[in-house]
C-alpha cells in the first residue's frame, strides 16, 4: 500500500516554464527539496573550500615559494577551515537528515516545515555573508579582504586593534546567522524524531540513522549555543567597545578559548555521529545482515554524546592549565575511545559472515572503518598531555583532524551519496565511475594525509606560509601536494558521475538495494506526500516484513 | 514490490506521541539556556576583576519591584492559559493583558535603571568589565522579554479581533513555557548580578 500513488500532480512537471519550477524551489517547505538544496549548497562550498586548500598546498609544495603572499595564505586557511566546517559539512549532514528522517520514520514531513525552510535560508545567507567579506571586508574603499584570524579566531587577534576593517565582523556575523539556522534545524530534528514516528515505531525500533540524528540534534543545541553566545560577546567587543576578551581592561583571552572549544570539540562529534548513521544503514544492507548489537550501538552513541561535552580543553593543554585540569581532560578524552571502539566492533560484527557486496557505497564505508580507526588512534596519542605539548599546533594535529574529517566523515558522506542517489534522483549512478572516484580519492587521501603526519613529527608548525629548505620537510610536502591532485581528480569524477547519471542514468525503481528501511518502500524520487498511506511498523526492518510475510522480523525482536 | 499492508490490521493500543510544539519549545529552551549559561559564566568569572570603577556595589540597587512584576506575570499567563483551555476567552484576554502590562512594567523598570546608570553614574558597556558583562547579561534577558512581549501583543490583537478560540490553548501553553523560562532566567540573573556579584 505504501507504494501506491495518489494522483496529486495533474500537471506534467517537465512542461512547466523554468521560472515557475525555480520559484517552487525558493518557496518550498518540502523536506525533500530542502534536503537537496542543503546538499547542493554544501557541494558548491565544497568546491570553493577545496580550491582554497589547493592554493595552500601549491604554496607549500617547495620551500620559499611565492605562489601567494603571506596575507593571502592567512585568509586561505581561515576561509578553508570555516567554509569546510560550517558551510560544507554541516549543510550536507543537515541535508541528508532533512531528506531522510521523515522518510525513514514513516511520516510526511518534518515537525515544522516552515522552520525547516527558514533554517536552510539562514544557513545559506550565513555563507554568503562570510564570502561577501572578499568584497566588503575593508569597507567602502580598497579591494576588500577576507577574514585572516584562523578558524578558531583566538583573542586578542580578533580585537579591533589587530583586525581592523570588517573582515572579522563578516566572519562573526556569518557564523552567528548560520548558527541560528543550525539550532532551528536541530530543534526540528528532535521534534520530528520524537513526535512524528509512524504508528508502531517505538524508539527502540527506529532506524539507527534516526537515533544518531537525535543525539546529533541534542548536541547541536548544547554546543552550537555557546558559539552563538561567544560570537555575540565578540561582536559586543568589536562594535560596542566591550572588554570580554580585552586583556588590557582585565578581560581574558583564555576565556574565548574555553568558549570556542566548548563548541569546537562537540562539533567534531556533531559531524561524525551522522556519518556513523550512514555507515550503520549502508553496512547491513551490503552485508545482507541486520545490524549487529542495535541496543549497544544506541547506548554507545548516547554515551559519546555525553562524554564529548566534557573533553573540550584537550585543545588547550599548551595554554598551561593546572595539573588537575590537564588530568581530567586527558582521562575524559581517552574515555571517548571506549564507545567508539564498541561501534567499530559492531560494524565488523555486522559484516562478519555476511554476503558482502562491494558496491561503491560499501567501499566507502569499509575505507571509513579503517581510516576512522587510525584517526581515533592518533587522537588518543594527542590526548596524552605530554605528547600534546610536543606536537600541538603542528602538522601532526592537522593530519589527525583531517584524517577524521576527510577520512571518516567525507568518506561516509560519499558513501551516503551513492547509496541514496537512486532514491533522490530516481536514477542509478554509474558503478564504474563510482569505483574510479573511490580509488582515486582513496589514493589521494592517503598520499596527502598519511604523509602529512611526518613533517608534523619533524617539527613543522601549522599555518606557516613557507619554510626553510634543509629541514627534511621538502619531500613530505611534495608528496602531500601530489595527493591533492588525486583527490581533486576523484571529486571531478564524482561531479561528472552525478550530472551524467542525473540525465542518463538507468531508472532505479523503488528499491535498488533490496534494503529494509521505509524510505525504500515509496517511489524514487519520493512523491510530495512521501507515503500514500502512513506505514505501520512492527520491527526494526519494516520493509523486510513486507517482503517476507512468512518470516517477519517482529517474531524475533 | 508487494502491495500487502505492512501488518494485518490488528487491534493495537492507540499510538500517542508527545506534542511537537512542546518538544520543540523545550528544545529551544535548552538552546537558550546554554546561551545564558555562557553569559552567566562570563559574568561570574569577571566579577571583581574590573580594573577601574564604578563597581557593582557603588551603583547597583536591588530591582525588587520589577522583579515582583516579572515573576507574577508567570502566574497571570498560567491563569490565562487555564482559562482558554476551559474556552473562557474573556478571562483569557484579561489575564493575557495583565501579563503584557507586567512585562512592560519590567522593561520600563530596566530602562529607567539603565538610564540612571548611564547618565548619572557613568557606567556604559565600554567603561569596564563590570559594564560589559552587566549590560550584555541583563540586556540579553531584556531582549528575550521584548521578544516575548511582541508575541504576547500579537496574541492580544488576535484576541481583540475575536480569532482566539479554545483550540488555540495548546499554542498559548507552548508560548507560556517560553515566558516561564524567561522568568526563571531572571531569577538566575538577579541572583548573579544583584546578589552574588554585588
Image (spheres, coloured by chain):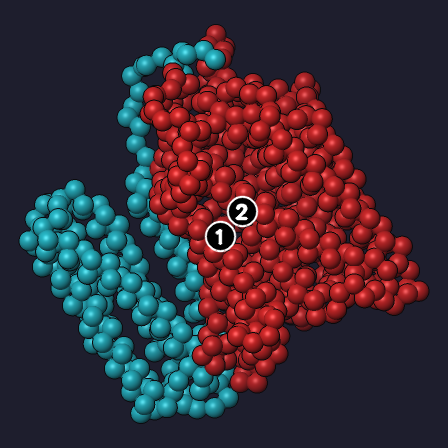
Chain colours: A red, B cyan
- Horizontal placement of B162 versus A347: left or right? left
Instruction: Please tell me which residue is depicted at 51% across the width and 71% down the height of the picture.
Output: A234
Give the vertical position of A354 relative to B113 (above or below): above
Quarter-of-image position of residue A367: top right
Label disc, if present, on residue A41 of the rendered structure: 2
Q: Which sits in the foreground, B68 or A94?
A: A94
Instruction: Please tell me which residue is depicted at 33% across the width and 50% down the height of the picture.
Output: B25
How far apart, in angstroms, are the residues tagged by discs 1 and 2? 7 Å
Instruction: Determine the chain carrying the residue at label 1.
Output: A
Q: For mark 2, give the secondary structure.
A: helix
- Horizontal placement of A495 versus A462: left or right? left
Quarter in which the N terminus of chain A is drawn: top left
- Residue A48, horizontal then vertical, whole percent: 63, 52
Q: Are marks 1 and 2 in contact (CB under 8 Å)?
A: yes
- Residue A357, horizontal then vertical, whole percent: 68, 21
Task: Specify whether residue A362 is in view.
Answer: no
Quarter-of-image position of residue A142: bottom right
Instruction: Please tell me which residue is depicted at 40% across the width and 60% down the height of the picture.
Output: B33
- Horizontal placement of A168 versus A545: left or right? right
Same chain under badges 1 and 2? The reply is yes
Label disc, if present, on residue A267 of the rendered structure: none
Q: Residues within 10 Å of mark 1 (few under 14, many from 20)?
A: many
The residue at which mark 1 appears reads as A124
Task: Specify whether residue A535 is in view.
Answer: yes
- Residue A429, horizontal then vertical, whole percent: 62, 27
Instruction: Determine the chain carrying the residue at label 2.
Output: A
Amino acid at each position: 500500500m505504501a507504494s501506491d500513488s495518489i494522483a496529486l500532480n495533474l500537471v506534467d512537471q517537465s512542461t512547466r516554464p523554468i521560472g515557475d519550477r525555480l520559484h517552487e524551489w525558493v518557496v518550498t517547505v518540502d523536506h525533500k527539496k530542502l534536503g537537496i538544496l542543503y546538499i547542493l549548497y554544501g557541494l558548491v562550498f565544497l568546491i570553493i573550500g577545496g580550491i582554497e586548500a589547493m592554493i595552500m598546498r601549491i604554496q607549500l609544495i617547495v620551500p620559499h615559494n611565492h605562489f601567494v603572499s603571506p596575507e593571502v595564505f592567512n585568509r586561505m586557511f581561515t576561509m578553508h577551515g570555516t567554509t569546510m566546517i560550517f558551510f560544507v559539512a554541516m549543510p550536507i549532514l543537515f541535508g541528508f537528515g532533512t531528506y531522510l528522517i521523515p522518510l525513514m520514520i514513516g511520516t510526511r514531513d518534518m515537525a515544522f516545515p516552515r522552520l525547516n525552510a527558514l533554517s536552510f535560508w539562514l544557513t545559506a545567507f550565513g555563507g554568503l555573508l562570510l564570502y561577501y567579506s572578499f568584497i566588503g571586508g575593508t569597507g567602502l574603499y580598497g579591494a576588500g579582504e577576507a577574514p585572516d584570524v584562523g578558524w578558531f579566531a583566538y583573542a586578542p587577534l580578533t580585537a579591533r586593534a589587530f583586525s581592523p576593517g570588517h573582515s572579522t565582523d563578516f566572519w562573526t556575523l556569518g557564523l552567528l546567522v548560520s548558527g541560528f539556522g543550525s539550532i532551528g534545524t536541530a530543534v526540528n530534528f528532535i521534534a520530528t524524531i520524537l513526535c512524528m514516528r509512524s504508528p508502531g515505531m517505538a524508539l527502540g525500533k527506529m532506524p539507527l540513522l534516526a537515533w544518531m540524528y537525535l543525539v546529533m540534534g541534542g548536541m547541536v543545541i548544547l554546543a552550537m549555543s555557546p558559539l552563538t553566545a561567544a560570537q555575540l560577546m565578540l561582536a559586543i567587543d568589536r562594535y560596542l567597545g566591550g572588554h570580554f576578551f580585552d586583556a588590557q581592561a582585565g578581560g581574558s583571552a583564555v576565556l574565548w578559548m574555553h568558549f570556542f572549544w566548548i563548541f569546537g570539540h562537540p562539533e567534531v562529534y556533531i559531524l561524525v555521529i551522522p556519518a556513523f548513521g550512514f555507515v550503520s544503514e549502508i553496512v547491513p544492507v551490503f552485508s545482507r545482515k541486520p545490524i549487529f548489537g542495535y541496543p549497544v550501538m544506541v547506548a554507545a552513541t548516547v554515551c559519546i554524546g555525553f562524554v564529548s561535552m566534557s573533553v573540550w580543553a584537550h585543545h588547550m593543554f599548551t595554554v598551561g592549565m593546572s595539573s588537575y585540569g590537564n588530568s581530567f581532560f586527558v582521562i575524559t578524552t581517552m574515555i571517548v575511545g571506549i564507545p567508539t571502539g564498541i561501534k567499530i566492533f559492531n560494524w565488523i560484527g555486522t559484516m562478519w559472515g555476511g554476503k558482502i557486496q562491494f558496491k561503491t557505497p560499501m567501499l566507502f564505508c569499509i575505507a571509513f572503518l579503517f581510516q576512522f580507526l587510525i584517526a581515533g588512534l592518533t587522537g588518543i596519542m594527542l590526548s596524552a598531555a605530554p605528547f600534546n605539548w610536543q606536537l600541538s599546533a603542528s602538522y601532526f594535529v592537522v593530519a589527525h583532524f583531517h584524517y577524521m574529517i576527510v577520512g571518516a566523515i567525507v568518506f561516509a558522506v560519499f558513501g551516503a551519496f551513492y547509496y541514496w542517489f537512486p532514491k533522490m534522483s530516481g536514477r542509478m549512478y554509474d558503478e564504474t565511475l563510482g569505483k574510479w572516484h573511490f580509488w582515486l580519492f582513496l589514493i589521494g587521501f592517503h598520499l596527502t594525509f598519511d604523509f602529512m603526519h611526518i613533517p608534523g613529527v619533524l617539527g613543522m608548525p601549522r599555518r606557516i606560509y613557507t619554510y626553510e629548505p634543509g629541514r627534511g620537510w621538502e619531500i613530505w610536502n611534495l608528496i602531500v601536494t601530489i595527493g591533492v591532485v588525486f583527490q581533486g581528480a576523484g571529486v571531478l569524477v564524482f561531479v561528472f558521475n552525478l550530472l551524467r547519471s542525473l540525465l542518463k542514468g538507468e531508472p532505479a525503481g523503488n528499491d535498488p538495494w533490496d534494503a529494509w528501511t521505509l524510505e525504500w518502500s515509496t517511489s524514487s524520487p519520493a512523491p510530495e506526500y512521501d507515503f500514500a498511506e502512513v506505514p505501520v511498523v512492527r520491527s526494526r526492518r519494516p520493509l523486510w516484513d513486507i517482503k517476507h510475510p512468512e518470516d517477519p522480523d517482529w517474531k524475533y525482536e | 514490490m508487494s502491495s500487502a499492508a505492512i501488518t494485518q490490521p490488528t487491534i493495537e493500543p492507540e499510538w500517542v506521541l508527545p506534542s511537537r510544539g512542546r518538544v520543540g519549545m523545550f528544545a529551544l529552551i535548552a538552546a537558550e539556556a546554554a546561551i545564558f549559561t555562557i553569559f552567566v559564566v562570563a559574568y561570574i568569572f569577571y566579577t571583581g576583576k574590573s580594573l577601574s570603577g564604578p563597581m557593582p556595589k557603588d551603583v547597583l540597587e536591588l530591582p525588587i519591584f520589577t522583579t515582583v512584576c516579572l515573576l507574577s506575570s508567570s502566574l497571570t499567563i498560567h491563569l490565562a492559559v487555564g482559562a482558554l483551555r476551559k474556552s473562557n476567552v474573556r478571562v483569557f484576554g484579561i489575564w493575557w493583558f495583565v501579563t503584557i502590562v507586567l512585562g512592560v512594567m519590567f522593561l520600563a523598570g530596566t530602562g529607567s535603571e539603565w538610564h540612571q546608570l548611564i547618565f548619572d553614574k557613568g557606567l556604559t558597556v565600554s567603561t569596564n568589565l563590570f559594564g560589559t558583562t552587566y549590560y550584555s547579561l541583563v540586556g540579553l534577558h531584556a531582549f528575550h522579554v521584548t521578544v516575548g512581549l511582541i508575541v504576547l501583543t500579537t496574541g492580544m490583537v488576535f484576541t481583540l479581533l475575536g480569532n482566539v478560540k479554545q483550540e488555540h490553548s495548546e499554542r498559548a501553553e507552548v508560548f507560556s513555557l517560553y515566558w516561564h523560562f524567561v522568568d526563571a532566567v531572571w531569577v538566575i540573573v538577579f541572583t548573579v548580578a544583584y546578589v552574588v556579584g554585588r
